[in-house]
Amino acid sequence: MKKFLVTAVVVCMIAGCGTMDVFERTVFFPKHEWPGSEKPSFYFQVEDTAARYHIFVVFRHEDAYHFNNLWLNIITRAPGDTAVTQQVDIKLADNTRGWLGTGMDDVYDHRTRITQSPVKLRKGAYTFTLQQTMREDPLQSVLNAGIRVEKVQP
């Protein structure tokens, strides 16, 4: 019931917002486990080539998550290019503040920017694939993982 309420509140907050230049998709892990063999992919279509964008990893976990970080391979395929793999270490907690994301009850949500500065994207379809590379397999207490692309407002 708690998880349903959390999801309902998040959906209502997003639906209540005005038009935003944002793409965000996540996958849900039904058993709250992310096997290393499961590599969710997300497709994003760029039309506005004059804009600049920030790219984020979205990660939602329970308080029982065993680690302070998340190691990921992010495979990006831009229009007309071969896939490029970027290995990132996303910091989720520290010893003084605890979890760094926003939390409600025992669920924590992280939106971590993986671009240093706003980037220009070419017109066309982009594919982002996430692969967790943690030492625990399957990775326990994981609810969602995904990608967020925000258009930077001038």
Image: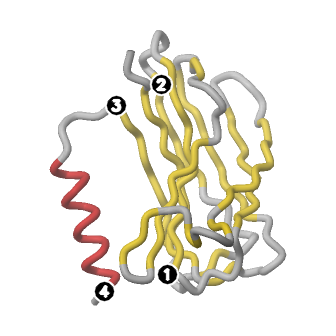
Nearer mark to the viewer, of 3 and 4 = 4
As drawn, 19 above or below 38? above
Nearer mark to the viewer, of 1 and 4 = 4
Rendering coords of residue 46 (x, y %): 47, 25
Lower position in the chain sequence, tag 4 or tag 2? 4
Q: Which residue is mark 3?
A: 21
Q: Which residue is mark 2?
A: 46
Disc tally is 4
Q: Residue furthest front?
A: 96
Q: Callout 1: few (<14), some (14-19), or many (20+) C-alpha neighbours within 10 Å?
A: few
Rendering coords of residue 51 (x, y %): 46, 16
Secondary structure at badge 4 equals: helix
- From the viewer's perspective, is 66 left or right of 141? right
Q: Callout 2: few (<14), some (14-19), or many (20+) C-alpha neighbours within 10 Å?
A: some
Q: Residue furthest top?
A: 50
Residue at x 58%, y 82% (from the top left corner): 141
Q: Which residue is mark 4?
A: 2
